[in-house]
Amino acid sequence: MTISQLFNAANLFVLPFWALMILLPNWKVTRQIMSSYLPFVLLAGAYLYLFISSITPENAQALSNPQLADIARFFADETAAATGWIHFLVMDLFVGRWIYWEGQKTGIWTIHSLALCLFAGPMGLLSHILTYWIAKTFFPKFQQNETVNAEEKAAS
């Protein structure tokens, strides 16, 4: 498999997980799939393969004391860029999964945060933190009721 094919496969691989969390968050199958760490193991395996493939003695030295110009040169290489991109895919999906489970536990609305996380992980995380804070601060009774309902759903 070429670097380009691995890059494309990784991009396609994450889409069903995002679709399930965003479009069918309360479906039993979504909960079962998102309770697994297997997607992260597979993506992390691809990352590890690319990381090992992209490290040279020069790159290792540059990364040991990172300077912006060195990082820019490192990511100019196609393998290094694919490695960095898969790093984003793994971490964004992991954060998205956390947001998803927080929404399942608390009843907080997460669709907007998950959509943001899909395209820009840190913005999705910030969105969820702010949404949680707003709900907790301005709608504490809703938050409490939703937590009880989420726990009841999990028990059944």
Image: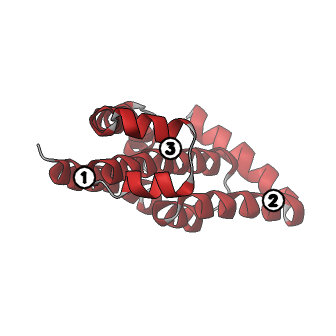
Numbered disc 1: secondary structure:
helix
Q: Nearer the viewer, mark 3 or mark 1?
A: 1
Numbered disc 2: secondary structure:
helix
Q: Nearer the viewer, mark 2 or mark 3?
A: 3
Specify whether 142 is left or right of 38: right
Q: Amino acid at mark 3?
A: Phe
Specify whether 2 is left or right of 118: left
In the picture of the structure, the residue carrying the numbered disc 1 is: 7
Residue 94 circle label: 3
Numbered disc 3: secondary structure:
helix
Where residue 4 sits in the image (x, y, percent)?
18, 54
Q: Amino acid at mark 1?
A: Phe
Q: CA distance from mark 2 to mark 3?
A: 21 Å
Q: Nearer the viewer, mark 2 or mark 1?
A: 1
Q: Is 105 drawn above or below residue 22 in the view shown?
A: above
Q: Is 26 drawn above or below residue 119 in the view shown?
A: above
Q: CA distance from mark 2 to mark 1?
A: 36 Å
- Front-lying residue, 31 or 114: 114
Label 2 Cα crowd, 10 Å radius (few <14 / some 14-19 / many 20+):
few
Mark positioned earlier in the residue sequence (2 or 3): 3
User: How many marks can you see?
Assistant: 3
Residue 133 circle label: 2
Q: Name the quarter where the C terminus is drawn.
A: top right
